Amino acid sequence: MVGITDTYGGEAPAKALEELREQIVGSDPWRLTGFLLPMVEGQGSDLERSQTYHVPGENPLDATTRTYAAIEVACLDLIGKSIGLPVCDLIGGRVRDEVPFSAYPFYKHAGGGGEGDDAREDEYGEALSPETLTRQVVQMRAKYGFGSIKFKGGVLDPDIEVETIKCLRRELGPDVPLRIDPNCAWSVETSIKVGKALAEELSGGGYLEDPCAGLEGMADVRKALLAEGIETPLASNVAVTCFADIPKSVQLDAVQIILSDHHYWGGMRQIQHLAKVSKMFGIGLSMHSNSHLGVSLMAMAHVAAATPHLTYACDTHYPWQQAKDEIVAGGRVRIEGGCVRIPDQPGLGVELDYDQLARGRERYEKCPYRKRDDEAEMRKHVDSEWTRALPRW
Amino acid sequence: MVGITDTYGGEAPAKALEELREQIVGSDPWRLTGFLLPMVEGQGSDLERSQTYHVPGENPLDATTRTYAAIEVACLDLIGKSIGLPVCDLIGGRVRDEVPFSAYPFYKHAGGGGEGDDAREDEYGEALSPETLTRQVVQMRAKYGFGSIKFKGGVLDPDIEVETIKCLRRELGPDVPLRIDPNCAWSVETSIKVGKALAEELSGGGYLEDPCAGLEGMADVRKALLAEGIETPLASNVAVTCFADIPKSVQLDAVQIILSDHHYWGGMRQIQHLAKVSKMFGIGLSMHSNSHLGVSLMAMAHVAAATPHLTYACDTHYPWQQAKDEIVAGGRVRIEGGCVRIPDQPGLGVELDYDQLARGRERYEKCPYRKRDDEAEMRKHVDSEWTRALPRW
């Protein structure tokens, strides 16, 4: 019997897991999560861990919590399989059977992207304007039934992005929550300007995610918007990425919605702790997503199913992955009505397709990257001199 | 197979459990804790729940969390027994095999107390002076090996209680942590006076517990002591009794150590959440105790074993119970070297002695009380006019 898990790729995460091999092999999965807990609990409370200048999965300061999370999920999957129970019922019991996810539209060039892909594999086509982005969303909603839209901005001029949100609102009507996430690309001033321009569009379950960098900047935006009577909450997976960030965030009222991620917060039980903290402070909770396949999607669904205080549909990049890359046996996990349903199968509810895994490994060997490098991608496709400027606008 | 649990006695708790019978009988213990979680998570965040004027177990505002906790422990015991694992390893895995408890000396008259008991059953005798209280502690340490002393004050004049702590310090030497808990019997002024008088005696792992009532009073005491350079932390199981109390406590720096109690915080997993919150804010965590027998002692030990951020030895009234009252099969749980060791047996690691349980039930039927009533006891033994005055000094 095998417990499976999924975490960030590349050499450093693989090495971290290799280094624990001796402690893991032959151990009891029920006990291992307690035995290794110092990897999570041993953190100091005063670390400066903001991910502003790191992409998730590359922040050296949460390396041990990421490694722990990967092991915890494998332990829970193995335990679930060994006793015939879904993971969500091992960690307190599910509070929902279906977990809502949101559509995650991106501006993009035409073409599938990735090594060896060609334009014929791109089901969504180019989206570099309000209208084409809106078309992408309509198409994605038709396929998956998403009830909320989380739009990745910070790519084009803020005025175009504002117009994109307005276009989405016109197309989707008043009841679909809209969110925009420019990945800290804006100054405080621009953030406030956008917040004002979209006051109505982001109300009713929407939010403004990481408009600018840092807790102080977020707090300034919040204060300025409130002064105008605009209650759009600010969400973050950048300014608050660990428990040590929370006291200051609360003090400054910098972040009103935390975007959790079991992959780097230290696993499923840490997300349950985070949910309690968030509830206690009246902070909303949603879930951040990196690119991922079906194993992570199911892990996200299980922890969300067992977390009562989850107040927004979760993010997922899953629609951007293709069946040919899926490593889950039986093909892609189904998202219907915008939701992933907790399956009756034990553990995470999925098994690996080892042929597909081998195919992924083959592609990895051929790929020149050993860690995520957004700048390198941008230089390849957009501008050979591209660097990440914060703020850009 | 039966899952056992223990909670507050009396008519109201029994009725609350009876009312859930239909939902509990025939349900899956893995799922029931999630299904009933709204009993804990449904609380508002703005309830005024201070226990200042309630004894633990009689606060109407945490009735549902108490009921939930009782059910959760039964579920975990049943699960553990069904798959052959100790409870601590079901909730994340133990971080320690032995759980330290502290001695809990009380001023007392001679005699065993309780219905039908006589003085011959009182192994500790009268303790109404510094010397006799110290003798009680020495005796209790010799029997159980406790490494910390938590002394219940608020009974005699504060000067006598100060002298009692000093007497304990002289007898026990500099390395045994000493705590004093007058159950809010002092004014802010008296609390500060005692805090100053015992600055040295309560340092090195000791604390001042609930010297006065309310978060504001505690904060005033803290501020005054810090102004004198006295860092004695204030502990509480009165001013902070639920998650909703924590934000204000943090803001005021009112409580530096939370005395958790899974019985009224909503169960074992809620205590794990509380531990994370406490760690995040640099708050210490220990454990409150009411009178209890072996089932509760084991539940306390299991949750403590699976809670990394437990920074002080836990309280227990267990030495004050007698073998003739124990409902655990095989007799009293052993406390050695001041610790309860997590047994290899599954679940809580204890089974009920149904004959003893029947005996307890018989005594309950004969007893005139249906809820805890400290004033009635005091009127019986001390002063027929006794009322609880806060502050008394």
Image: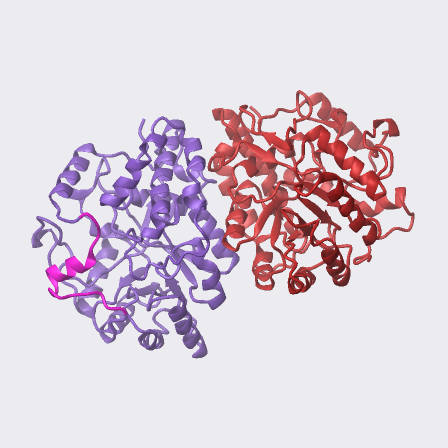
Chain colours: A purple, B red
- In the figure, residue B136 lies in which quadrant? top right
Q: Nearer the viewer, residue A259 or A342?
A: A259
Numbered disc total: 0
Residue A74, position as x, y percentages in the image: 34, 36
Q: Is residue B290 part of the magenta span, yes or no?
A: no
- In the rendered structure, the answer to whether residue B324 lies left or right of residue B79 reads right
Residue B78, position as x, y percentages in the image: 54, 29
- In the figure, residue A180 lies in which quadrant? bottom left
The span shown in magenta is A370-390
- In the figure, residue A229 lies in which quadrant? bottom left
- In the rendered structure, the answer to whether residue A318 lies left or right of residue B298 reads left
Residue at image x 76%, y 47%? B166
Residue A75, position as x, y percentages in the image: 37, 34
Q: Is residue A306 visible?
A: no
Residue B386, position as x, y percentages in the image: 88, 50
Q: Is residue A385 part of the magenta span, yes or no?
A: yes
Q: Nearer the viewer, residue B353 or B87?
A: B87
- A281 to B317, vertically: above or below: below
Residue at image x 60%, y 42%? B262
